[in-house]
Image (spheres, rainbow, N blue to C red):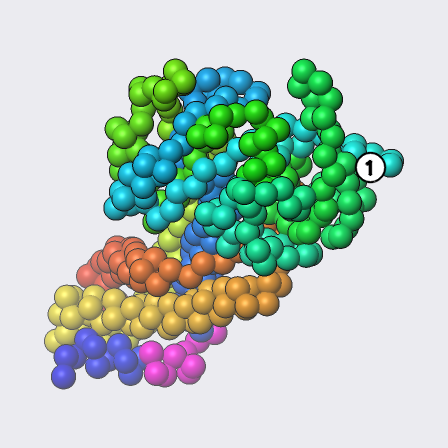
Amino acid sequence: MNFSWYMARRLYSRSGGTQRASRSAIAIATAGVTLGLAVMIIAISVVLGFKTQVQNKVVGIGSHISILNYQSLYSSESQPIVISDSLLRAVRALPEVSHAQRFCVKTGMLKTDDSFQGVLFRGVDETYNLDFLRSQLVDGELSTPFSSKENTGRIALSQTLSQQLHLSVGDRVFAYFFDDKLRARRFTVTAIYATHLSEYDSRLVFCDYRTAHQLLGFEPDQSSGAEVAVRQMELLPQASAEVSALVNHRQDRYGGYYSSPTIKDTYPHIFAWLDLLDLNVVVILLLMIAVAGFTTVSGLLIIILERTQFIGVLKALGASNGSLRHLFLYYAILIVGRGMLLGNLLGIGLCYLQQTLGLVHLDAETYYVDTVPVLMSWPWVAVVNVAIFVAATLSLLLPTLIVSHIHPARSIRFE
């Protein structure tokens, strides 16, 4: 058996009988690694969960890519563009695309007896994917899709609008549209949702595609645009390039030019904010690695100084500087290993509790979510474990050099 490894295990197993300073140093070093690793796991899991939830909400309402009339990018009112069945089939055939659907958007005003609010009616049809909207419902239901062939009079509005207008599921409300002349429609509230994204919740109302299409006065083959969903967010650049090649700089038969902005083009401030979180994580990781390395190095220095006589005796018996350096390096690695085990248990345990119970709450108006989101990524957990182990081990090489400068004759008499 390796002499250095054997002696390191013996010393570590008897650490409870060492001097008070040494026991405190071991405890502090272990705690430093434990807390450092736990904080790293929690920080990465929270940031991944937060970015994923916010991205899913933004994309769930707005889609990854929009096909619009170029003039709609610079107009408060949507401009018509031809979204033919053949165009939708071509877009859906792209390997990165999971879904494509047409929509119409019309500005209007909802009015009750004691309040009113300007809103944006989004008309969607049977092809519209309602899964995300259903997952955000707080009241009512969307058991049947919206229609492109009839005006059912159903609307789904946000919890923010329902509170402002004092509306509940089943209530009837008048909507007014201002064009060349005033037009009124009466709707029934069938569902109330809450995404906690103020840009959507403060104005977006879902209705039948046919209703919005008629109010806009578009030709039968015209729409406000089409929404394109991508299979994974990582495929967005490639999908955007393919959709752009398919439609950009082309005209429809009415003279409208196509454009295809991505969700990042539409809401750059949200994605810039999410990207900034990555920098915060890097700072936290570096700080925690520094804390773990500093506490481990400090603990090892104390342990070496307290065992000066032990080192002198081993040198007098023929132990080399290299074997003694390995001995204390192995000893410190055992401390790091214990700290990493406890750190994994603490970090993963807290993440699991938050993921299942939602113990820590947030202000949804500020952070877009009502509880701290957590997404465990096992590859990232493995990466931070390797990073903190390598960093701690490399930092331990310097204090072990002290062993080489300890003289046997003087150290045996050392008190």
In the displayed structure, would residue 199 be above or below residue 191?
above
Residue 74 position in % (x across, y down): 50, 17
Q: Which residues are magenta?
A: 12-21
Q: Secondary structure at mark 1?
A: loop
Which quarter of the picture shows residue 36?
Answer: bottom left
Residue 385 position in % (x across, y down): 33, 62
268 relative position to 242: left or right: right
209 relative position to 69: left or right: right
Which quarter of the picture shows residue 67?
Answer: top left
Going by the numbered disc 1, the residue's amino acid type is: Thr
In the image, what residue occupies the spot 69% across and 56% down? 139
User: Is 136 contained in the magenta span?
Assistant: no
Instruction: Identify the residue under disc 1.
Output: 112
Which quarter of the picture shows residue 317?
Answer: bottom left
305 relative position to 127: left or right: left
Mark yes or no: residue 334 visible: yes
In the image, what residue occupies the spot 49% across and 26% down? 219
Quarter of the image with the C terminus in it: bottom left
- In depth, the one of 50 and 195 nearer the eye is 195
User: Is 15 contained in the magenta span?
Assistant: yes
In the image, what residue occupies the spot 69% across and 21% down? 178
In the image, what residue occupies the spot 39% across and 42% down? 100
